[in-house]
Image (cartoon, rainbow, N blue to C red):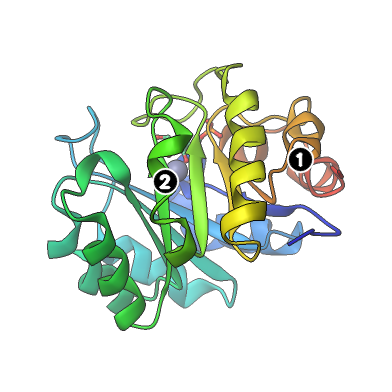
Amino acid sequence: MQNTTTLLAPSILSADFTKLAESVALAEKAGADWIHCDVMDGHFVPNISFGPFIVKAVAQCTGLTIDTHLMISDPDTYIPDFIKAGSHQVTVHQETCAHLHRSIQLIRSLGAKAGVSINPATPVSTLESIMPDLDLVLLMSVNPGFGGQKFIPASLEKVEQLHAMRNKRNPNMLIAVDGGVTVDNAEDLVSRGADALIAGTAFFKAENPAEAAKIIKSASR
Ligand code: DX5
Ligand code: ZN
């Protein structure tokens, strides 16, 4: 699939949680396509963020796609709760799923789109068999756990590898990149094959979020 405009997914992890509804409205007004919800359990990643309760509140604030990124151990236990909370797409980590195909089937059976995320140290090749069953891959370009980290340059080559594999195995699957995305690296990421860019700091902490959104969304192949 070739997108004409880049999909933008602001991560609410970097939003002002005392003004969650306003933050979501800001993203919506700036042309965001998805709202990215980063769920961290303090076990798989060294930080705790929020659970289905906040995802539900976000979903109630917007008609945008709720894109939930589960950085949690044993995701199968919680997938139904996050879909009930209003997630339209749910992404699990390859590193946390002993039976990845089963987790993907579970997400899809509950009516949501299914994604798999891989850490910077996990090779793209690990997705080859599961790719035909995926709606998206979320390529981590930082080690998951925190917003505001520096983009890992080796991720660029992984975007290209994913793009080549996607063309062969599942042309409808989207490639999303998460971590350290900025107005400066957006074009490079999209030209190598990214369809969607997750932006926490680059959007919510920007001096002018609307302008940042415009630049990121206009990145093209
Ligand atoms: C990292 C999260 C990211 C993060 C992005 O663990 O999965 O979604 O919030 O934040 P920035 O864009 O600030 O790197
Ligand atoms: Zn994320």
Q: Residues within 10 Å of mark 2 (few under 14, many from 20)?
A: many
- Element assignment for label 1: helix
Q: Residues within 10 Å of mark 1 (few under 14, many from 20)?
A: many
Which of the two discs, 2 and 1, labels the residue nearer the N terminus?
2
Q: Of residues 19 and 6, which is closer to you in this image?
A: 6
Asked if 91 appears above or below 185 in the picture, the reply is below
Work out which quarter of the rendered image holds the C terminus and state it: top right
Q: Is residue 207 left or right of residue 57?
A: right
Percent across and percent down for residue 70 are 31, 51
Asked if 114 appears above or below 85 in the picture, the reply is above
Q: Give the residue type at disc 2.
A: Leu
Percent across and percent down for residue 192 are 75, 35
In contact (CB < 8 Å): disc 2 and disc 1: no
Asked if 123 appears above or below 165 in the picture, the reply is above
Residue lying at 31% horizontally and 44% vertically, measured from the top left: 94
Q: Which residue is mark 1?
A: 190
**Is residue 199 shown to the viewer in this render?**
no
Q: Marks 2 and 1, Cα distance to the nearest angstrom? A: 20 Å
Split into quadrants, the picture shows ligand 2 in the one at top left
Q: Which residue is mark 2?
A: 127
Which corner quadrant of the image does residue 53 belong to? bottom left
Residue lying at 19% horizontally and 35% vertically, measured from the top left: 44
- Element assignment for label 2: helix
Residue lying at 59% horizontally and 46% vertically, measured from the top left: 165
Residue lying at 51% horizontally and 25% vertically, measured from the top left: 148
Which corner quadrant of the image does residue 204 belong to? top right
